[in-house]
Image (cartoon, rainbow, N blue to C red):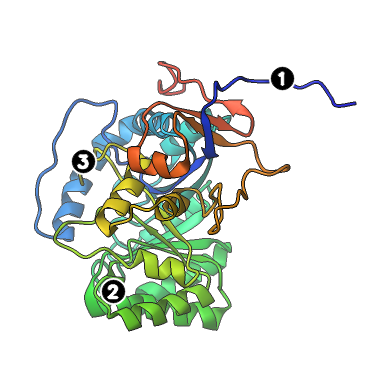
Amino acid sequence: MLPEVSAIDMAGKLALPAFKERHNHLDKTYLSLGWKACRPVSKLSERLALEAAELEVLAESVEQRASAMIERHLSYGVNHIRTHVNIDPFIGLRNLEGVKKALKKYEPYLTYEIVAFPQHGLLEHAEVPDLLRQALASGATILGALDPAGVDQAVEESLALTMALAQEFDVDVDMHLHDRGEVGFYTMDRWLEMVEACGYTGRTAFSHAFGLAHLSPAMQTNFAQKLRAQQVEIMTTIPISIHNQLIPIDTLRQQGVRVSVGCDGFYDSWNPNFSGDILEKVQQFCEYTGKSSERALRESLGLITQGITPLDANGQQVWPVVGDEASFVFVEASCSAEVVARVPQNRQLMHQGKLYQASSNLHVPSK
């Protein structure tokens, strides 16, 4: 005899795997504050200087702002967030503490990872390595890194210290790599050599990885095979810029490299324009790369579901099956391809059997 279970009538809506936001910055958003456009800059160092100038003020509202961003993600069907959190000499661990409080409030509806992120460099400020150690001992679950060439201006030293810290705390590494061209490619290639030498396979993600964009197709394929061998995941966002070529997402996936798409930041000092809808990013990817067939559209959904799609390459249903986690996004659509192409706005998230119900007072800071 079957045990009694409660049932929820979803009125014929389509069930999809819950979405995963794998590249985000909960501590940076201006959400819940008044309108503020960002100031144009000509290089990364200028952007970082502008960000540093407002860190102290923004730290006071980090829990409130992070909560507002989390609620936006939940409303769009996201039940997992990997967030980078600034760990820097200007505010220490204050952003980390605020983000932790925000995430804690929403644990019934999502899982999360916290990346201790040295946004203002690992080497320039002597206190940063110890601050990262404190963060990893205080709730951060992943070690971040940023442009060993462009920001730290010392590729070997920066990579070596990053590996030493990762091994010290036995944590994965998520490395932001904006550097383009040969230096960006060299940084990734050198890190893979360290990973192999240190036995750290399966512990790395490259965020952005812009250095892959302008390689020849043959080099892209060969390097994708290296990434797969070391089980490196690529975290990117769409679009990068109309002035710059996208990284070779299709080539990477064809070679067995897992690629995840995230919103990065939205409505912050870097960019005021993003909606925060991760599904919109998938639609943009399909538009930019000319994907329009039923199969191409539905397979692109895997960019935001950790590769899980309802149908396999042959069109046979492979998800959900008995025993799968009861985490879904319910939408008004006939199939997953239509969802990618049309981006329905009314969505209902279920996380581990629990329906998310938005509340107008959830993002009030905790006492």
Q: CA distance from mark 2 to mark 3?
A: 29 Å
Q: Give me the disc on residue 6.
A: 1
Residue 257 placement (x, y as % from top left): 47, 68
Residue 360 placement (x, y as % from top left): 40, 16
- Depth check: give the residue in front, 340 or 20: 340
Q: Report the residue marked by disc 2.
A: 184
Q: Earlier in the sequence, mark 2 or mark 1?
A: 1
Label 2: which secondary element: helix
The kind of residue on which mark 2 rests is Gly
* Residue at the image point whose x is 28% and y is 72% from the top: 211
- Depth check: give the residue in front, 14 or 115: 14
Circle 3 crowding by C-alpha within 10 Å: few under 14, some 14–19, many from 20: few
Q: Give me the disc on residue 20.
A: none
Q: Earlier in the sequence, mark 1 or mark 3?
A: 1
Q: Give me the disc on residue 54.
A: 3
Label 3: which secondary element: helix
Quick check: 85 left or right of 273? right
Quadrant hosting residue 127? bottom left
Q: CA distance from mark 1 to mark 3?
A: 49 Å
Report whether residue 275 is seen: yes
Q: Are marks 2 and 3 in contact (CB under 8 Å)?
A: no
Q: Earlier in the sequence, mark 2 or mark 3?
A: 3
- Depth check: give the residue in front, 89 or 194: 194
Q: CA distance from mark 2 to mark 1?
A: 53 Å
The kind of residue on which mark 3 rests is Glu
